Amino acid sequence: LKQTGLWDEITTNTLVKAAVTALEFEIAEDILTNHTVTVNGERGVGANSQNSRVRKSRDHPNVEAYTELLDGYAKSSQLEKAVGVMQLMQKRGVEPNEYTYTCMVGAFARNNKTRQARKMIGYATEMILSSSSSQRRRNTLTPTFNAFISGILTENSSSDTESKGQSSHAANVLEALEIVQEMQDLNISPNVVTVTLLIDGLGRCNPPRCQEAKDLVQHLEFTTRPPRASYYADILTDSNEHRVSLSNIKIATAMIRAYGRANDIESAIQSFERIPNPDVVALNAILDACCRSSQLKLALEKFGEYVSFEQWRNQINDMAAVAKSGTTIKPDVVTYTTLISALLQLRSKAATKRAVRLYDEMKKKWWIYPDTVLVDTILTTMLSGGSFGFEPDDIQFTLTVLQDASGLEWEDGQYEKRKKAVRSILVGCSSEVWKNDEFAYGLQSTDKKKEADEDPLFVKKGWNRIDSGFRLWGGGNTEESLDWTRSPIDGVEDGKSDLSAADSFLASKGWNDIDSGFRIL
């Protein structure tokens, strides 16, 4: 491409994106160093003349490549290098666009650099409004404001001034509400994402501020102008999808989560029933809300009402009917994780059997395989009580889950760690189920000596493996004992030794013949 002069902005963007995806940031920087065109179309550093002539028709450089690198650094927690890319853009005459500013705002906000984030918002606002004051152009700033709200409300955001806690979170929620007011003052319309982020933030307060969240939605429903959509878009999609309202599926799902944290199951059910066609995310939210509120029976009822493999199979050939009815929802692994976890926490035989049936249904009917979260949930619950009361069915279920876990992607040593934990519990069980099929479940080591040396029960108790030679009813090393009785003794003719004649009986029982010195008389 370089020799033929076919290298253009698309080539640069594609290669930089590939390098950033592979976390090869130095390669991405090298590409940009050698293939950057200034605003006036002059040849950039390292670009050949033919490539420069091709690019002269372009009135702007490929800012997307720089934005890709900047975002890669930001998401890899390398904020200083992301700022360095921003400075490099300024040095090379590459003007940032709204996407560049959005990435920087989110990076600053996630690292609690709210002052710098707000400064970036100011730059972006000035750039957009100076070029056009149309409503459509103003609304292109909504994702930038959303990045700020998401950054300060995210659960793993870092703080330099104070430790994590409800006081910090409450302050961030207040700042997020202030930024929404600023949006409205600038005639920038908050969208569904904005409202969903605010609901989630209010729901994670202690106690959850659910009523405020509901009032906010109702206020924005009448003050926010929905984005314009074409006539055909309204026909092909749900017209309520982009409109702020309590019946919007994303907003209603966020409200369900908030009510679930507040243990307000009645309000959560009302929010769920407002959704015209609930999806699996909404279903998972209402199931979680029920389980949080100790309403497992209600959760199972909702699951049975909306999840039916038979109905889904019968309607799968008529996708229009499925979309229209909205009564049959295909579950996912999160659905089953929520229910199985709640059932196992009851620690009853009936609940455990129900959990086993759900696990089998998940795999055999829906062809849904467990993830690491579900595996850890089951193993932790099943092994928490130790070997006491661990019945054969429990052992079988635990081993099945462990066997399914072998096909998942684990960090180095993590699967072996879980396998050892299971075996350490099972060696204390009276049941022989696991021993009869050790090879099938991968619990038996091929190295017998290593397995003996590392037996978790002996390590736990601090026992050694020296054979005392004692056997209650025999069973010792009889061959060795017989060899000893047959061996000649110095000064005694073979076969006439008192020891050999005295007791083959002792040898047969595994007893020793040391004289204790005790005499009755």
Image: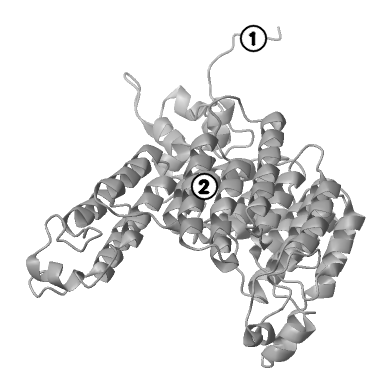
Q: Which residue is mark 1?
A: 518
Question: Residue flagged by tag 1: what amino acid is it?
Answer: Phe
> What is the number of callouts on the image?
2
The quarter of the rendered structure image containing the C terminus is top right
On screen, residue 213 above or below 152: below
On screen, residue 164 above or below 369: above
In the displayed orientation, state which residue is furthest to the right: 266
Q: Residues within 10 Å of mark 1 (few under 14, many from 20)?
A: few
The quarter of the rendered structure image containing the N terminus is bottom left
C-alpha gap between disc 1 and disc 2: 96 Å
Residue pictured at 73% horizontal, 40% vertical:
385
Question: Residue flagged by tag 2: what amino acid is it?
Answer: Ile
Residue pictured at 77% horizontal, 74% vertical:
307
Q: Which residue is mark 2?
A: 121
Find residue 243 and report its horizontal and vertical position in percent.
72, 69
Residue 272 sits in quarter: bottom right
